[in-house]
Amino acid sequence: MHENVYTADNAAMLLIDHQVGTIAWTASSKTGDIKRNAVSLATIAKAFDMPLVLTSSQEESIQGPLIPELAKVAPKEYAARVRRSGIVNAMHDENFAAAVRATGRKKVIVAGITTEVCVVFPVLQLLDEGYDVQVVTDASASFTKIGDESALRRIEQAGAAIVSTPQIISELAVDWTTPRGQELGQVLFTSQPVSVLLRTGWRWFWAMGLGRAIRGARTMRAS
């Protein structure tokens, strides 16, 4: 295993401003995909005891509360979310910065809404403070595709890695045949649209030992 790998034991998950109103403003990605992937990240963190920090901005205004799906999969973290008064850079909020540092992790996985306002600035500060950062682009979005792409370019040029939810799942899984790999396989398959699953070639995944995970995912979908 290479030395810079992200694991459930050395990384923390930071989800920024996945709020009902804010997500509705975005146009760079499908809102259903954003929600599904954000919830998948929270689910992964909870399943493997990764520190999970949630934050929101101006919930009492048109941004609204965090999406209810996060409360369902991470009720403790939802209740403990850092409710910012309007500070753009979440790392400028003393409570959020303290929560991040309290994780004791120097590798962080970040996603948020919007990429160009609520993600880029805390990520730049985290990099300045010596954190290794992965930004999950398919669990983040912006008002426009141009805005999203420009924010991601700035983040990447500063030193963050731009990744997707399946990349995060695969990196944490390490081996699909292990109990952890099987569980993460279920998260992967339940988090993606059916059309994506068909394009990925399910027979190849089955051959890799994910058959049981797929069967579990089908059971979860049916329930």
Image: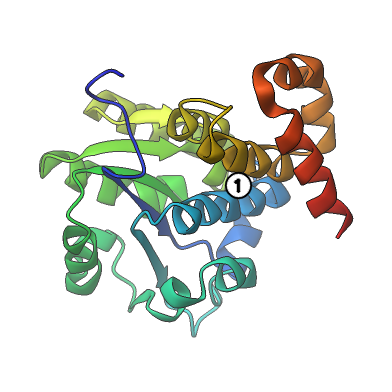
How packed is label 1: few (under 14 Cα within 10 Å), some, or many (20 or more)? many
Please give the residue where the numbered disc 1 appears in the rendered image: 37
Question: What residue is shown at x 65% (from left), y 61% (from top)?
Answer: 24
**Disc 1 residue type (three-letter):** Asn
Residue in front for this viewpoint, 152 or 219? 219
Quadrant where the C terminus sits is bottom right
| Residue 208 in sight here | yes
Residue 106 in percent (x, y) is at 18, 44
Image point (67%, 23%), residue name: 209
Name the image quarter holding residue 132.
top left
The answer to whether residue 141 of the structure is visible from this angle is no
Q: Is residue 95 left or right of residue 39?
A: left
Q: Quadrant of residue 99?
A: bottom left
The residue located at (41%, 29%) in the rendering is 162
Q: How is the image coloured?
A: rainbow
Residue 142, image x, y percentages:
53, 46
Location of residue 94 by image quarter: bottom left
Indicate left or right for 1 with 38 as reference. left
